[in-house]
Amino acid sequence: MDDRNPTIGLRVAVTGRVQGVGFRPFLYRLAHACGVAGWVRNQAGRVEAHIEGDGAAVARFVAAIVVEAPPLARPAVAAVEEAAVEGLDGFRIEASRAGAARDAHVGPDQFCCDDCLAEMADPHARRHRYPFINCTQCGPRYTIIARLPYDRPNTAMARFPLCPECRAEYEEPLDRRFDAQPLACPVCGPHLAFTDGSGPTIEDTTAALAGAAAAIRRGEIVAVRGIGGYHLLCDAYNEAAIARLRERKPRPDKPLAVMVPQRGADGLDGVRGIAAPSAAEAACLLDPMRPICLVARGGSRPLPEAIAPGLAEVGVMLPYSPLHHLLLGELSSPVVATSGNVAGEPVLTEPAEVEGRLRHVAGRFLHHNRPILRPADDPLFRVIEGEPRPLRLGRGCAPAEAELPLPVAEPLLAVGGQEKNTLCLAWEGRAVVSPHIGNLETVRGLAVFEQVAHDLQALYGVEAQWLACDAHPRYTATRWARGRRLPVVPVYHHHAHASALAGEHGVAGTILCFTWDGTGLGPDRTAWGGEALLGRPGAWQRVATLRPFRIAGGDRAGREPWRAAAGLCWEAGVSWPDLPGDRALLHHAWTRGVNRFTTTAAGSLFDGAAALTGLCLTATYEGQGPMLLEAAAGGAVGAAIPLPLARTDDGLWRTNWGPLLPMLLDGHLSVAERAASFHTTLAAAIVAQAKVVRDDTGVETVGLTGGCFQNRLLTEQAAAALAAAGFDLLLATRIPANDAGLSYGQAVEAAARGGA
């Protein structure tokens, strides 16, 4: 024995994303490289290792655990303890052990890695052109896991017994497919089937793929089953096919996402043919989650205007599954890839249901027989202030792990809002946000909501002891929560927005948080949406707002922006000559308060501006008016119109939007000038409010959250002006600023209050 460097033993516990990402074979190879002996095993959500060897070798091993980890792993060394030296010979991988599932980290579904793509393209490989190729660094996770630990018998792959060749790879620690749970090949794995829903089904994988590609080339719409559900695909240059898709779905105006073949040295030559990605957008597109990213239109082969009517950006994504790579390779051209669902519902996953419910939309169906245990729609990102910001969580990035600034005493399920719904399961200091569920007004929306609520608790072995929900009594999720036999904590909509941002950034002190969006119920029982909240989770105080105004039409106002415009004009005593409908009758109803509500919502102000400029009187999708208004501003230079800012009798700072109306109605100005000035004015109004609150309180940190701050023009102008005024700025980075972040914010807020 070398007394200067004696043999020592250590027991190491590693948490984080360490299962299903090739972490144990990585430690096996690392042990051989460092010359240490021992063993490694999965235990619930962590990896445990015993290592022994000379001190220097053991130190090298421990130091490399995080810095040399596999690309998909997100390890954290939770504990390192001395252990007795057992005199082991070599290093082995032991069988998984059961343990506390609440320590688990359920991995999101992953893209197809470069190694598998190369193998799939190799004519001599046995997985040549096999649409379900994968390894430890790629393939499905969340959508196939039935229960933990993440072993093949506990996944949807249990129905596919491994052939001898796959079994050999699965059991060889030095193979990149060691313990890869979705492992498959053409002999033992899933296969494709192609049908028109009535005639003979093509069950040969190669022929089925060719049939789908031929149908798309002919101008047909094909429903294709992917990792987390179905897409509706058609040729992105075939305007007749796009028109049929829009008419049948129906989706008359809402932007359609486009999937583009991966080509060129960096994989983005196809994207550059239709768009002009910035460096940050290019990095986002190439991220392993392979999201949809909003990118400026451009390129040598611009897409038809019908892809995103009136907008300057298009949602682009690269193929992420082997199936999509093969299909796009056959076509060598972009395809529309919109969610395979009935409008407003979660994406469909089952072949029979798709054929039954989407037969009027798709003429052909490309199925496969690998089960999808729960849906996961595509994630959506937009680069704002130089960083990709999530607009929708989904396949590739959810379940999303987050921390709680303050732990919960008992496990909590936060049930989110009415639209863009997500769920958040919180226990101890952890929070897990589900993929996008969507609108809960439909039967399927509620069914998927209930499934995900059950699955999150079952997967993590955490049973919620109390619930957090939106304070609005008519929200579906709120009614669902109150129907359980558990304590319920209601959280006001904008308090949840503010707490989500504070929680993501781990804020302990006081911040000023602007929560601008459509509408949400405030403590005064009016529709808030243009608020500035001062404080921290559990202790928010409304300190500034926008001038309230009244809108007639109830729920119809969201789809008819002209109603917001009419309310603004009547409130300010301004004439709007282009008001649609019977002006006298409408004004009479508004004056008498028939089906009328009062709001301070910035989102409604955006709706009104879009209508007054003639861009959008009637909307066919949420946010259409504000999106068109931002696009119309383009590169125009806006002039900030001074808006009066005064304190009310109850001490609340209030900005009067009235001076905006003459500018918005001024036909001597171009629509671009009016749209640009509107954004510049509101950005200046944010800074003005921040300054007076700082004068009152000394607060130096400002947060911007809520759906309005998905608007890049508004956010970047406000951010620049706030920085120039000496404020520190917080923006959402991992949790969406829109209503998809409400569930996490509800959890943070409830935890800060200390219980039900």
Image (cartoon, rainbow, N blue to C red):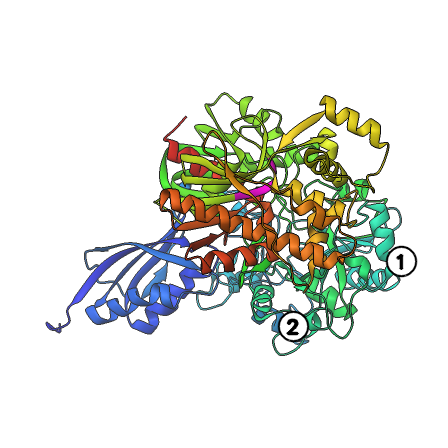
Q: Quadrant of residue 562?
A: top right
User: Does the magenta run of residues contain 292?
Assistant: no
Q: Tag 2: residue type? A: Leu
Residue, disc 1: 240
Number of marks = 2
First in residue order: circle 2 vs circle 1? 1
Residue, disc 2: 268
Q: Position of residue 432 (x, y in %)?
A: 47, 44
Q: Tag 1: residue type? A: Ala
Of the 4 image quadrants, the one containing the N terminus is: bottom left
Q: Is residue 340 visible?
A: no
Q: Is residue 271 above or below residue 604?
A: below
Helix, strand or loop at disc 2?
loop
Does 1 sit left or right of 351 as displayed? Answer: left
Q: Main secondary structure of the magenta part?
A: strand
Please name whichever residue, 49 or 343, is drawn nearer the observer in this view of the structure: 343
Q: Is residue 230 above or below residue 185?
A: above
Q: Which mark is residue 439?
A: none
Helix, strand or loop at disc 1?
helix
Please name whichever residue, 570 or 616, is drawn nearer the observer in this view of the structure: 570
Query: Disc 2 vs disc 1: Cβ atoms closer than 8 Å?
Result: no
Of the 4 image quadrants, the one containing the C terminus is: top left
